[in-house]
Image (spheres, grey):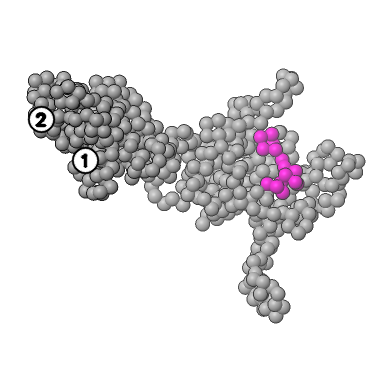
């Protein structure tokens, strides 16, 4: 466990912060607003009594003191006065005469301790038994006495860190309040311009890290210790620590929707991030993020996942990598097949097997439109390999496709597992000649046509065609449909889409009957089942 850094006297005050406009980016909160913010963090400040009564009690104890009271339009800085009953801060000439305390954002870091250190968890049996209560041992008394002492010094213990964060928040809070790629700055009215302006740019230009740390009277080592301590403070409160990086990549507005321990954790992470950035501006070195403090590895896994490490800010590329790491990336597979026949078959099998549309599985299907267009689609595959987890190419081994596929493998666009080139053709590698002719004959019969064709005659004619034409030979299915159009054989052509549907039916029936045994002789089934299992 990282120990609390020693209490240091910082050369800065809330008065200096108030007079310099340090609360523009993170305004002070009224009692009601602070109470609401505490409740969002799982701390009820008004349980059994009014909110102001509880806050006044905490002020008197020294657990949680307001930054200032607003009286007659002028601030009364609490740090400049000993505790007095809040009645003395009441306004006398206003409708609402109650004291008007104000708190800063960073006091929410210890509001839970301010309350919980004053409580003890006991069983009802023990509480209601007078005799058992009287037996409380000295060890327990000593323990709770120390907790009470800690509670009374809590505000003072946090004072250095809170003032440090207040001094830095004008420079770094807009970065914390923003989105993954944009800062969010609060505008101020400039009377010389007559309009609201963004003070953040001027703050960045005029900010001198070395001058600020000298002004505060702190050292670089102090900043490192405080940053680490805040990271640990957040980590021990965080119920969703394994989602740390993903939540830090969300916008500040989304993180504000967190509740209880998760919200308190990210308050601490915000504070740690401010100090991390300040340390970087001071030294050019990066301190560990809170999720890395207890990671005893050499962090090489981060370099493998994100391509670089360490880094100051997250990018959308980092978000993509983190979503993939948590198996949340929606675009799993981009499957490119040669033509409409393969597209119909693949879509049918995937959707029938998975029971949902291809798009719902995070998949996209595209066709090459013929292997001659492989080069045109090379850039498409390059792009989709960035957005999809895997880009998969399935095509006939014709034309220049083999050369282009090898190039894509060398460039890392495809791999041996994601590039499938048929030895002969999609139809021949996955169906027998008799099966192809049989599907065609079934369609002919349904249309009232008698087809005079069998697998042997088809194979003989097709082999002769290929031997004569060579590289320009027709595909197996195209040639088969050409033969069936011959009036002497029946004069029937159902079209490739109808044949594709029958191919899908045959494959699905085979898979249902034979299970895993159907995969080896039908490589398209083996590929598609693997894809379904991945998605």
Q: Which mark is residue 308?
A: none
Q: Please state the horizontal and vertical placement of residue 230, each as a whole percent of the image.
A: 56, 48
For the C terminus, the image quarter is top left
Mark 2 and mark 1 residues within 8 Å of each other at the beta carbon = no
Query: Is residue 90 visible from the viewing direction of this image?
Result: yes
Vertical arrangement, residue 201 with respect to residue 519, above or below: above
Q: Which mark is residue 522?
A: 1
> Mark 2 or 1 closer to N-term?
2
Helix, strand or loop status at disc 2: helix
Q: Please state the horizontal and vertical placement of residue 480, each as a whole percent of the image.
A: 18, 27
Identify which residue, 279 or 528, lies in the foreground: 528
31 is within the stretch colored magenta: yes
Q: Badge 2 local density, few (<14 within 10 Å), some, or many (20+)? A: few
Q: Give the residue drawn at x 91%, y 41%.
A: 93
Residue assigned mark 2: 457
Question: For this view, does 55 lie left or right of residue 244?
Answer: right
Q: Give the residue drawn at x 60%, y 38%.
A: 253
Vertical arrangement, residue 241 with respect to residue 427, above or below: below
Question: For this view, does 105 lie left or right of residue 499?
Answer: right
Question: For this view, does 187 lie left or right of residue 376?
Answer: right
Helix, strand or loop status at disc 1: loop
Separation of residues labelled 2 and 1 (CA atoms)? 23 Å
Which residues are the magenta region?
22-37
Q: Give the residue drawn at x 38%, y 47%.
A: 298
The residue furthest front is 448
Query: Is residue 223 visible from the viewing direction of this image?
Result: no
Identify which residue, 168 or 292, lies in the foreground: 292
């Amino acid at each position: 466990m990282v120990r609390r850094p020693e209490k240091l006297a910082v050369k800065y005050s809330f008065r200096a912060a108030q007079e310099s406009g340090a609360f523009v980016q993170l305004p002070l909160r009224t009692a009601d607003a602070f109470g609401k913010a505490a409740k969002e963090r799982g701390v009820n400040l008004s349980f059994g009594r009014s909110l102001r009564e509880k806050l006044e009690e905490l002020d008197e104890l020294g657990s949680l003191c307001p930054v200032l009271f607003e009286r007659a339009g002028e601030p009364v800085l609490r740090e400049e006065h000993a505790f007095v009953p809040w009645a003395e801060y009441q306004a006398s000439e206003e409708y609402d005469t109650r004291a008007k305390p104000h708190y800063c954002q960073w006091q929410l870091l210890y509001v839970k301790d301010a309350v919980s250190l004053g409580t003890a968890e006991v069983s009802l049996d023990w509480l209601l038994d007078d005799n058992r209560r009287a037996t409380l041992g000295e060890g327990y008394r000593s323990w709770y006495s120390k907790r009470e002492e800690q509670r009374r010094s809590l505000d003072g213990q946090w004072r250095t860190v809170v003032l440090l964060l207040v001094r830095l928040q004008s420079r770094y809070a807009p970065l914390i309040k923003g989105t993954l790629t944009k800062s969010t700055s609060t505008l101020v009215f400039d009377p010389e311009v007559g309009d609201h302006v963004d003070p953040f740019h001027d703050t960045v230009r005029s900010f001198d890290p070395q001058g600020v740390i000298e002004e505060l009277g702190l050292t670089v080592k102090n900043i490192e210790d405080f940053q680490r301590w805040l990271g640990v403070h957040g980590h021990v409160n965080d119920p969703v620590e394994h989602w740390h990086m993903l939540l830090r990549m969300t916008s500040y507005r989304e993180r504000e929707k967190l509740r209880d321990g998760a919200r308190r954790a990210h308050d601490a992470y915000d504070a740690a991030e401010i100090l991390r950035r300040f340390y970087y501006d001071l030294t050019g070195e990066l301190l560990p993020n809170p999720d890395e403090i207890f990671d005893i590895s050499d962090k090489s896994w981060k370099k493998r996942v994100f391509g670089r490490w360490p880094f100051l800010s997250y990018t959308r590329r980092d978000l993509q990598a983190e979503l993939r790491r948590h198996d949340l990336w929606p675009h799993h597979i981009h499957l490119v097949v040669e033509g409409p026949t393969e597209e119909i078959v693949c879509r049918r099998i995937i959707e029938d097997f998975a029971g949902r549309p291809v798009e719902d599985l995070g998949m996209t299907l595209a066709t090459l439109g013929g292997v001659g267009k492989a080069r045109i689609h090379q850039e498409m595959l390059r792009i989709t390999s960035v957005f999809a987890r895997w880009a998969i190419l399935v095509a006939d081994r014709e034309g220049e496709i083999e050369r282009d596929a090898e190039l894509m493998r060398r460039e890392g666009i495809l791999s041996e597992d994601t590039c499938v080139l048929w030895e002969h053709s999609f139809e021949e590698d996955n169906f027998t000649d008799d099966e192809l002719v049989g599907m065609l004959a079934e369609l002919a019969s349904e249309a009232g046509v008698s087809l005079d064709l069998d697998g042997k005659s088809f194979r003989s004619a097709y082999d002769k065609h290929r031997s004569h034409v060579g590289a320009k030979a027709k595909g197996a299915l195209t040639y088969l449909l050409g033969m069936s159009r011959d009036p002497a054989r029946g004069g029937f052509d159902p079209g490739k889409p109808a044949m594709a549907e029958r191919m899908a039916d045959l494959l699905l029936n085979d898979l249902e009957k034979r299970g895993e045994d159907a995969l080896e002789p039908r490589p398209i089934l083996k590929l598609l089942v693997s894809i379904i299992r991945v998605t």
